[in-house]
Amino acid sequence: MAIPPEVLYKDIPELFEIDLGEALTARTEALSTFRELGPPDLCHVVKSTGRTGQRDLGSYHYVSGVDASSSASLAAYINSLTYAIEENSAWFSSTAKWKVRNGCYCCFNAFSRVDMRVDVKIPGGVNAYVIGLRGERHEATPEIWQETYVSALLRAILYSDDPTYTLEAYRKLDPITNAEGELRFLQAAEALFSKGWQVGSDPEIQVATVVSNHLTAGIMKYFGDSGRFQQAANMFEKIMVHEPEVSSLLARSYIGMNEEVKAVQIIANAMKETPQSYTLLHAQCDFLRTKGKYEWAVKLARQAVNCAPSEFVTWEKLTDLYIDLGQYDSALLTLNSCPMFTFNGRDAHRTLPVAKIHLPFTRAIGEILPERTKTEDDEADPALQRLPAPGLRGTWARAYSLLTRLVAQIGWDELLKTRSSVFVMEEEYRMQKAQGDIKQVGGNGQAASGSRGVIHEDGTVVQDDKASTRGIIAPPSPEPNEVPTIKISSDSVDLRGADPKGKARAKVEDEDAEEGDIVATPSHLRNGVSALVEKPVQAAGEDKQDSSDITAVAQAEPFSFSNKRLCERWLDNLFMVLYEDLRVWTIFRAEVAHFKTQHVAYRKTGMEWEILGDLGVRLHHKEEAKEAYQRCLDGTRYSVKPWARLMEMYAEEGDITRAIRVQYQTVYNINEYTDFLAPR
C-alpha cells in the first residue's frame, strides 16, 4: 500500500497499519501478559482527507513522558499531532490535505492492572474509559487517574536509558519539566507508597516489598542520580512514621546529602523496631564499606542472609564483601549458594507487520550524522557476535559480574585452583563413586567412623556427622527436563536465560582447532593463548561414567569430600562463559602486541571495536576498553553506546572536560526522538 508523503509527520516517528485499528486490538489482547510496569504508552491516530472514496490511514507510535494525570492532558497531546503533519509546499496544489480525524491514547495502569484510554474526535468530544484485562470497559475514577499518572512517570524514568529496551518509533519526552511537576510527582508517590509493591520490582528481587519495588527505584533514580536527595528525604520522613522499614531509604538519602551522622542515628533507631530488615542491614554494609570496615560489614551481611535467605541480593552482598576481604574461597561458596530467578524482561508490545515505517530525522543535525544504513563497519566476526556473556540477564548477569571481579583480582589460574579446592570436580567425583561401588560389592559399604568438618556457605568450618559425605556419595538427582541449553562454541550459541527453576546448562564442545576463529592469528600466538588460558574442567554434578572408569580407579586411594561442596550447574556454566570471554580477550591482546612489534596497523570494524570495548568492561580492563571505544569512533558507524560509555569513564575519572566533549551523544539522542534521558 502506497503512503503519500503529505500524510507523514514532520519530526515524529510513526508506523502505518495494514488494517485500520489493528494496533489497538493487539494491545487489548496483550493486556493480560503485562507483568509489571507495562509497556510505553501507545498513541494511535486516524488520518483522513475527508473526500468520499478516499481510504483513511491508521498510524501509531510509542511515547513516554506525556502527562497522564487527566483526560484533558492526553487529549491535548493528540491535538498537538494535528499540527505536526507535513505541509504541502505548493499552495496552489490540488492535492487533498490530510488531517488527524480522531485518535486514541493508551496508558497502562500498573497498580490496578488496567489500560486507561482516551478517545478524541476532531472536531468532537473526548471520551475517557478503562479497559480491563479481559477487554471489558469500566468508568475512570480519580484514584485510577492518579495511579495511571504515577505509572506513566515511572516508565519514563526507568525505561529512559535502558540499553536492552528498544522499540521502533519510540518517542521519549521529559516527564517533569519544572519544580511544580516534581512536587506533584512526590505528592502522588506519597499517596500510593503503600501500594508500591503492586508494580513489581527489579529482576534481582524475588518478592517486591514496600521498600524494594519500582516506585522506590524510580524515586531514588530521579532524585538520587541528579544529586538532589533533599526532596526524596522530605517524603521518606513523612512515610517513615507509618513504615519504619523506609528508614533504609531515608538513611541512603542523608548519606547522599553528606549527613552521615544523622543517617547512622536513623538506622540505629530503626533497627530497634525492625531488626530483621535486610534493607537496613545493607544500608549499614554500604556505609561501612565506604569507611573500609569490611570485617564489620561482613557480619551484617551474614545477618542479612539469615533474615532473607531466599533473596539473591543478600547473598550477592556477602559475596562482594568476601572479595573485598580477599577470602576468595568463601566468596565462591557464597556465590554458589545464590538463589537464581527466572528473568522477566520489560513489558513490550507485540511486533506487528506494518505498511510503512516513518523515522524522520531532525534536519538541523541530519547533515552532521552518518547515514543510518548498514555498511561494512557494522559487520563483525561471527565468533565475536556469538559470545554468550552479553545475553545474560537478571541474576545471571549479576552473578557473572561477581565472577569477573574475582578473576580480575586473582587471575584465571588462581581462580581455577580456588574452584577445585572448594568444589568437587568431576574426575574426583567419579573416583569417589567408583570406590563406593567397589566397597558395596565387597560388603564393606560403611564409611569410616569419626566426625568430619563441613564448610558452610559463609566459609566457616564446623564438626558434623557424615550426612554431607553420604550426600555426595549418593547418586545425584536428575536434571529437570525443561533446562535450556547454552552452547559455547564457534558453531552456535543459544543463550535464552533461565528455566522456571532458575537453572541453565552449558554444552561445551571441543574448540582446540578453533582458537583462531576471531582473527587470522599466527600459530605461535594461538599456542600461547592456549597456554595462558586453560580451559576449565567440569565440576561434579552429573552421573556420567562407564565401567572402564571404575576399573581405572579401583586400586586408587579413597578421597574425602567432607570439606567440599557440589558446584551448582549454573555456576559451572558461568565458568565456561568466562572462559570464552577470556579466550577471545587474550587472543585480541596477543594480536595487538604482535602487530605493534611488527609496526603494522591493527584494523577492526566499528562493530568489532564496540564488542571488544564491551568485553573489556566486563573483564574490568578499563583502559583497554576505553581505547577500543575510541577506535570505534574513528569509523562512520551509527552507534550511541561508545559515546555513552566514554562519558561514563571520563566522569568516573574526574575528567570533566572530556566528559562534556563526549556529550556529543546528545545529538544522537535528539535524532532518536529523545528529549529526556535519566539521570539528568
Image (cartoon, rainbow, N blue to C red):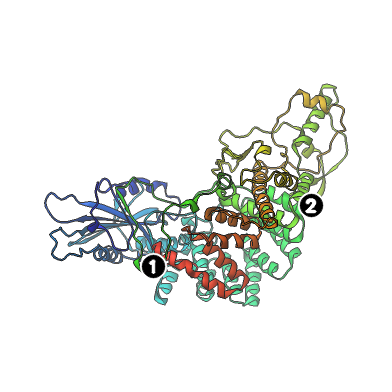
Question: In the rendered view, does 78 fall on the left or right side of 561?
Answer: left
Question: In the rendered view, does 158 fall on the left or right side of 43?
Answer: right
Q: Residue furthest front?
A: 599
Label 1 residue SS: helix
Relative to the observer, which residue lies in front, 351 or 74? 351
Relative to the observer, which residue lies in front, 406 or 249? 406
**Front position among marks 1 and 2:** 1
Question: In the rendered view, does 150 fall on the left or right side of 306?
Answer: left
Q: Position of residue 272 (x, y in %)?
A: 65, 67
Q: In which quarter of the image is residue 493?
A: top right
Question: In the rendered view, does 84 fall on the left or right side of 151?
Answer: left
Relative to the observer, which residue lies in front, 625 or 455? 625
Hey, what amino acid is under mark 2? Thr
Query: In the rendered structure, are the residues bearing label 1 and label 2 in contact, judged by CB atoms less than 8 Å apart?
Result: no
The vertical placement of 623 against 379, above or below, is below
Label 2 residue SS: loop
Hey, what amino acid is under mark 1? Ile
In primary-sequence order, the first of circles 1 and 2 is 1
The vertical placement of 312 against 189, above or below, is above
C-alpha gap between disc 1 and disc 2? 61 Å
- Name the residue that disc number 1 marks: 365
- Name the residue that disc number 2 marks: 460
